[in-house]
């Protein structure tokens, strides 16, 4: 049973480490204002590679999601939005900063 507790704590610790990575909370705050495309998030990070990595990490954590829209006879539009989990996480982070 102690092993399960350790595993749960390890998962929580990794989750916190991923959220604390540079630009992760900046991305969440930007998405709180509404859905954004990659180009609209580019200004948040020093490099496109870093932004891409952070987006994939946040998707894996299920705090953001991709929205794919393909209007008739037009290019595919991919945007990102906060999930309910992401909104909750962001509200907790904001409370933490206030104290």
Image (cartoon, helix red, strand yellow):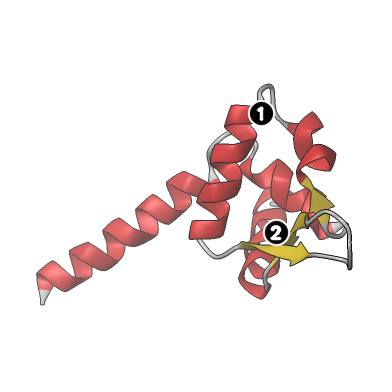
Give the side of residue 11 with respect to residue 27, left or right: left
Please name the residue shown 89% across and 62% down the image.
73
Dividing the picture into quarters, in which one does residue 22 lie? top right
Residue 25: image tag:
none
Please name the residue shown 28% across and 57% down the image.
10
- Relative vertical location of residue 92 with respect to residue 28 in this rendering, above or below: below
Most distant residue in the front direction: 73
Q: Earlier in the sequence, mark 2 or mark 1?
A: 1
Q: Tell which tag, 2 or 1, sits nearer the viewer.
A: 1
Circle 2 crowding by C-alpha within 10 Å: few under 14, some 14–19, many from 20: few
Give the side of residue 47 with respect to residue 21, left or right: right
Q: Nearer the viewer, residue 3 or 33?
A: 33
Task: Tell me where residue 87 appears, x and y as whole percent.
Answer: 70, 67
Circle 1 crowding by C-alpha within 10 Å: few under 14, some 14–19, many from 20: some
Q: Nearer the viewer, residue 97 or 4?
A: 4
SS for dot 2: helix
Please name the residue shown 69% across and 22% down the image.
46
Please name the residue shown 65% across and 36% down the image.
23
Give the side of residue 44 with respect to residue 58, left or right: right
* Residue of label 1: 48
Give the side of residue 76 with respect to residue 16, left or right: right
Residue 95: image tag:
2
Q: Nearer the viewer, residue 27 or 40?
A: 40
Task: Tell me where residue 85 appears, x and y as whole percent.
Answer: 61, 71
């Amino acid at each position: 049973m102690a092993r399960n507790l350790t595993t749960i704590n390890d998962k929580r610790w990794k989750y916190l480490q991923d959220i604390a990575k540079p630009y992760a909370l900046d991305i969440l705050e930007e998405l709180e204002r509404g859905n954004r495309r990659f180009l609209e998030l580019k200004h948040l990070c020093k490099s496109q590679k870093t932004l891409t990595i952070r987006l994939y990490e946040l998707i894996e954590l299920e705090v953001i999601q991709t929205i794919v829209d393909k209007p008739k006879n037009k290019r595919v539009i991919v945007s990102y939005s906060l999930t309910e989990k992401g909104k909750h996480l962001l509200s907790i982070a904001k409370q933490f900063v206030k104290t």
